Image (cartoon, rainbow, N blue to C red):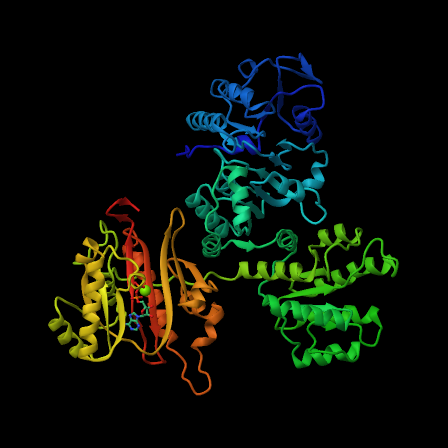
Amino acid sequence: MMPASLDLNALFAPRSVAVVGASPKPSVGRYIIDTLRSFGFPGAIYPVNPGYEAVDEFPCYPDLSSLPTAPDVVAFCVSPERTLAGFRQLPGAGARAAVIFGGGFGEAGDWGRDAQAEIVGLSREAGIALCGPNCMGVISPHARSATYLQVGSKREELAGNVGLISQSGSICISMLSDVSRFGFSLVASTGNEAVVSAADVLDYMVGHKETEVIATFTETIAAPERYVAALERARAAGKPVVVLKVGKTQRTREAITTHTGGIAGDERVFSAVLRAHGAVEVDEFDELIEFLAACQGRPWPKGRRMSVVTSSGGAAELMLDVAEKAGLELPALPTADFEEARRVIGDFAGDGNPLDAWGNGNFRENMPHALKVAGRVGNTESVILCYDNDDDAPMGRIEDYLARVDILETARDTSEKPYYQLTLRPGLRISAQIPRLRALGIPPLFGVRQGLGAIDRLARWGEPVAEARPNATPVELKGIAISGRMSVNEYDSKRLMARLGLRVTKEHLATDLASAKAAAEEIGYPVVLKAVSDTILHKSDQGLVIVGLSSPDRLAEGWRLLEARLGALGTEGAGADIMVQEMVVDGIEVFAGVAYHEGFGHALAFGLGGVELELHRDFALRMLPLRQGDAEAMIGEIRGAARFEAFRGRPAYDTESLAACLYALSDLIASAGEAIREIDLNPIKVLPKGQGCAIVDALILPKESEGGNA
Ligand code: ADP
Ligand code: MG
C-alpha cells in the first residue's frame, strides 16, 4: 500500500525543482527551465547534467547527490535507464516528489516492468509522490510551477478554476489549447499511475483552494476505493467532478492495455459508480468542454428548467427537437408571461419556449424584452440566448453582436437566474465577446446539444441527493450456509429470499415418485420438476427443468426423464436432489442480478428476461445500497418499461411488489454482502397489479467458494 503520508504539495507547489537531463540546447529539460522562468517560479531551480557547468544563470549539478538543498520535485528528462539510475539517488537526496515523462516502463517489456516495480518500491519506502511514468507531468499556474513536457509562457491566461486529471497526455494538450472560456487551477497528466493515481490527485484537488470544478479523462481506475472516497469528498465540498471515460468498446479497451498498462473495468458499472457518488459523466469530449464552460457561469442553475430566447422560428424548432431527444426541460411560457412577451414583440409561433424574439422585427427592443420576460418566469431556472455569428462572417455588423453582451448583462442584472449565450453549432465565435462574457459570468456555450446538455448536467448535479433508506433488519442466515459452497442452490437460495419477505414458488424436495406425487397434490397441478444441486448452475442447459406437468401421469413421465438425465451425468447427477415446484403460468419474466465489483462494491441489475436481456441488453443498473426511489426509477428506465402498463383492457402489472423485491436484495447485501459475490433471480414473474411477483429461480454465489476465492 502507498504510505498515507504521500504529500502532493511537493509535486504541485514545490519550493525547488531539479531537472535531470537539463541542458542549454533545445530539449525537454531546457523547456522545463524556460517554462519555470516565464511562470516566475519563486523557488530554486537545479539543472542536473554532468556534461555542463551551467544552464543559463543556473549552476548545473553532476548528479542528484550534489544538490545544495533537497529538491521538492525531480523531473526526469532522460532515457529509462538513466531515469532508473537517477531514481535510486532520490531517497538519499531527500526528494519528496518526482515526474517521469518518458515511456518504456510498465507499459513496455520485461525490463520496463521490473524498472517500474523498483521505482514504485523506492517511492513507497521514501514517500515520494511520483507522477508517471509515461505522462506529460503537472502544471500549477497559481503556484507558478510546471514540470510539464510542453513549453509554456502564458501563465496568467492559463490560470483558472478547472482542475484537470488525464491519464492521456494528448488530451491535456488538446484541453490546454484553448483557455478563452476557462482556465486551469491544476493540470495533472498521470500516465501509468505507478504511484500517484487519479484518485490521489482528485483528493488533492478537493482540498485545493483555486480548484472549483474537476475534469477527469479516465482510461482505468487504479485505486477504486480511494477514487470513490475522493468523489464523495468532492461532492461534500461542492465541487463538481466531470468524468469522460474511454474504453467503452472492445477496440479502445485493447488500446488501453498497451497504452497505460492497466485494464479497463466494466463500463456500465463505472457509470453506476459515478452516479452513486455524485460525479457527472459525459460521453464525448465536446460535452466535457461545454460542461466546464457552463461551470464558469454565476450563479449555478438551481433547477433543470430552461428558458431559451432565439431570433428565429427555425432555430426554436431545432432546439425543441434536440431538447426532446436529450430529455431537457423547456416548459412553455405561462399565459400571463406569454401575453407580456407578445405585448412588445408582436406575434410569434409556438408556446414561447424557445421564445422567437424576432416578432415585429424591432430587434433592439424585442431581444431585451424577451430576455427580461424569460428572467422573470416562475417555471424556469436559467435563461439562454441563442444565435450564430462569427468573427469572419460576411454578413451582419460586429457592433450589433458586441451590443448583445450589454443586453445580456442588463437582463441578467434584473434576474436571479444564470444567463448563457449559445450558438446553434460549435465552431463559431465572436472573439471579442468571449472575455467580456466570461468576466460577467455569462458563459458563451457552443452547440445546442452540448451547450444545453451542459447546463442540464450542472443543474442535475446540484439536485439534492435522494434519501438513504432506513437500515435494513439483518436477514437471518441460520441454517443456510453461504460461504464455502460452490453455489447456494435454487432451493436454499429461495428459502433465504422467503426470509426477506419475498414470495417464492411453492416447492418441495422429493425423494421418490410417490413423495413427488404427494407434493404435487398439495401444490396443485400443473407443476415443474427440477434438479437441485450446488454444482449445477444452469439447470435447463442440461435438460434438468421440466415444466408444465399437468397430471400425475405426466409427473411420472417427467420424473423418469429427469432421473435418466441425471443418471447420464454420472457423479454430478447422482449428487442432485429433485424438486417439485409450483408452475407460475402468468406474468412477465424479469430478472434481478447482483454482482460484486472489487473496490466498487455490489451492483444491482434489473431488466426484462429472455430476448430483452440476451439480445438487447436492456437493463438498469445501480450500486448498492439503493436509495429511496432507486428501485422505482430502475423499473421505469428500461426500454421495455411500457410492458408493465395497462394496455387494451389488459391490467397493469405489480411493479410495486417488484420494487419491494429490488429493495429486499439491497437489504440482503447490506446485511450479508460480505459473504455474497453474486445473486441471480432469473426469472422473477411479475403478476397483475395486486397479485405481487413470484421468484421462480434463484441462485447465490459466495465470495469464498469451495475451490478457494472464486
Ligand atoms: P435455469 O437454471 O436454467 O435458469 P430455471 O429454473 O430458471 O432454470 O428454469 C428455466 C426456465 O423455465 C425459466 O426461465 C422459466 O421460463 C421456466 N420455468 C422454470 N420454473 C418455472 C416455474 N415454476 N413456473 C413457470 N416457469 C418456470
Ligand atoms: Mg433461471
Residue 288 appears at what percent x and percent y? 61, 52
Q: Is residue 80 left or right of residue 535?
A: right
Image quadrant assignment for residue 58: top right
Is 515 rendered above or below residue 184? below
Is there any visible trace of residue 389 in the rendered image?
yes
Q: Is residue 221 left or right of residue 285?
A: left
What residue is shown at x 54% (from left), y 21% (from top)? 81
Which is nearer the eye, 507 or 228?
Answer: 507
Which is nearer the eye, 435 or 3?
Answer: 3
Is 243 rendered above or below residue 576? above
The image quadrant where one finds the N terminus is top left
Dividing the image into four quarters, tell me where ligand 1 lies.
bottom left
Residue 247 appears at what percent x and percent y? 53, 48
Is there any visible trace of residue 471 in the rendered image?
no
Image quadrant assignment for residue 500: bottom left
Residue 261 appears at what percent x and percent y? 50, 37
Image quadrant assignment for residue 610: bottom left
Residue 193 appears at what percent x and percent y? 50, 36
Which is nearer the eye, 117 or 227?
Answer: 117
What residue is shown at x 17% (from left), y 57% (from top)? 574
Tag count: 0
Q: Residue furthest bottom?
A: 649
